[in-house]
């Protein structure tokens, strides 16, 4: 009995000693990690310099939104601090409220009618079995992305303007002509159709890459089980690209208030500021063009803060749905 007790106590002591002395895997020192990963760090240096030089350092200039900024006499260091005065003036400015209303309505409209278009286009291109035909169609739909907004607006003017092709055909048929390029009531449809024609083809590239990553064996197994095309689409294709859809939707929400400057600037005189005034054009006309840089900086900073809140909220919603989103806590 004494021997048994001694053995048990030895085993217990040995187990406790092993449990106590089990070493944790030490974290590699940052110098060692740098020695191992220096090629990756070296490749990242140009991009880091670009981001710091053209994004983070200029962002410090947003301090002028809280100053009575005098660029030629005081500068950033010599201008008087006025706190949130400019932000209070913004919310009392009818032009700013109009720009905010137009921006939010255009963003909501394009989320519904523009965002699904690249997904549908990618699904259509992916379903084409002929490789040559698919390559030709991809080249055709990608091409408008490389056009400038000046060229895009000019093409739409030649098609949908008062003297455009569509109006001429309607007049020859005995109907009244149209001039959608100067109609404020249809401006939101016009800019959405322009964005779809220009950017949808390029936006489909990411979804095509996600579709190519889906295992083809899943489709074969579903077909053997009797699943039709629509069931395979619903139960295999869409779940397979859902993480990409959620990620791009979050990024789109974060960039929601950047509806585009050039597109609206080029068409502002045709439809008027009542329909075309957005945040970017407001910053230009009310801040930069008039020399009120502090007022324009306040509007731009407000837009950035709202975009940050939107992307954080959308990312939180993605986590609640079980998706990774843009980032996730480790």
Image (spheres, rainbow, N blue to C red):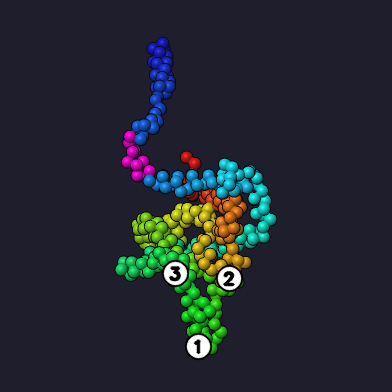
Q: Is residue 36 magenta?
A: yes
> Distance of mark 3 from mark 1, alpha carbons?
27 Å
- Residue beneath the point at 42% across and 64% down: 145
Mark 2 and mark 3 lie on one chain; the one further toward the N terminus is: 3
Answer yes or no: is residue 177 visible: yes
- Location of the N terminus (image quadrant): top left
Q: Earlier in the sequence, mark 2 or mark 1?
A: 1
- List the residue tagged with mark 2: 271
Q: Position of residue 86 (x, y in %)?
A: 64, 50
Residue furthest top in the image:
2
Q: Position of residue 297 (x, y in %)?
A: 58, 51
Q: Is residue 229 visible?
A: no
Q: Which mark is residue 140?
A: none
Residue found at the very far left of the displayed protein: 132
In the image, 33 versus 181, the foreground residue is 181
**N-terminal of the two: label 3 or label 1?**
3
Point out residue 21 in the picture as x, y percentages from the top left corner: 40, 22
Residue 265 placement, left or right of 140: right
Range covered by the magenta-colored residues = 35-45
Label 1, secondary structure: give it: helix
* Residue hosting label 3: 151
Q: Relative to the observer, which residue lies in front, 76 or 252?
A: 76
Q: Secondary structure at mark 2?
A: helix
Element under label 3? helix
Please name which of the two marks, 3 or 1, marks the residue nearer to the observer.
3
Number of labels in the image equals 3
Q: Is residue 74 above or below residue 139?
A: above
Question: Mark 1 — residue?
Answer: 172
Q: Is residue 157 left or right of residue 218?
A: right
């Amino acid at each position: 009995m004494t021997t048994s007790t001694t053995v048990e106590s030895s085993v217990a002591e040995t187990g406790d000693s092993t449990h106590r002395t089990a070493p944790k895997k030490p974290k590699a020192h940052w110098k060692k990690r740098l020695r191992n990963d220096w090629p990756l760090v070296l490749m990242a240096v140009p991009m880091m310099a670009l981001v710091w030089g053209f994004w983070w350092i200029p962002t410090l200039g947003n301090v002028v939104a809280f100053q009575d900024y005098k660029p030629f006499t005081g500068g950033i260091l010599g201008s008087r601090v006025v706190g949130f005065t400019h932000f209070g003036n913004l919310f009392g400015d009818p032009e700013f409220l109009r720009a905010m209303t137009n921006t939010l309505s255009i963003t909501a409209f394009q989320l519904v009618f523009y965002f699904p278009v690249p997904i549908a286009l990618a699904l259509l291109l992916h379903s084409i079995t002929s490789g040559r035909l698919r390559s030709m169609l991809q080249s055709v739909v990608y091409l408008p992305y490389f056009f400038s907004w000046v060229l895009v607006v000019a093409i739409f003017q030649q098609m949908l303007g008062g003297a455009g092709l569509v109006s001429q055909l309607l007049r020859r048929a005995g109907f009244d002509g149209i001039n959608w390029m100067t109609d404020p009531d249809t401006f939101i449809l016009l800019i959405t159709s322009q964005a779809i024609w220009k950017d949808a083809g390029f936006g489909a590239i990411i979804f095509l890459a996600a579709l190519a990553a889906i295992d083809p064996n899943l489709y074969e197994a579903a077909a053997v089980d009797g699943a039709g095309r629509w069931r395979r689409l619903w139960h295999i294709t869409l779940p397979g690209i859902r993480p990409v859809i959620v990620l791009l939707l979050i990024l789109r929400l974060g960039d929601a208030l950047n509806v585009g400057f050039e597109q609206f600037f080029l068409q502002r005189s045709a439809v008027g500021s009542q329909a075309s005034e957005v945040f970017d054009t407001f910053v230009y006309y009310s801040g930069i063009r008039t020399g009120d840089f502090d007022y324009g900086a306040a509007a731009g900073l407000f837009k950035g803060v709202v975009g940050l809140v939107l992307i954080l909220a959308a990312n939180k919603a993605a986590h609640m749905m079980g998706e990774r989103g843009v980032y996730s806590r480790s």
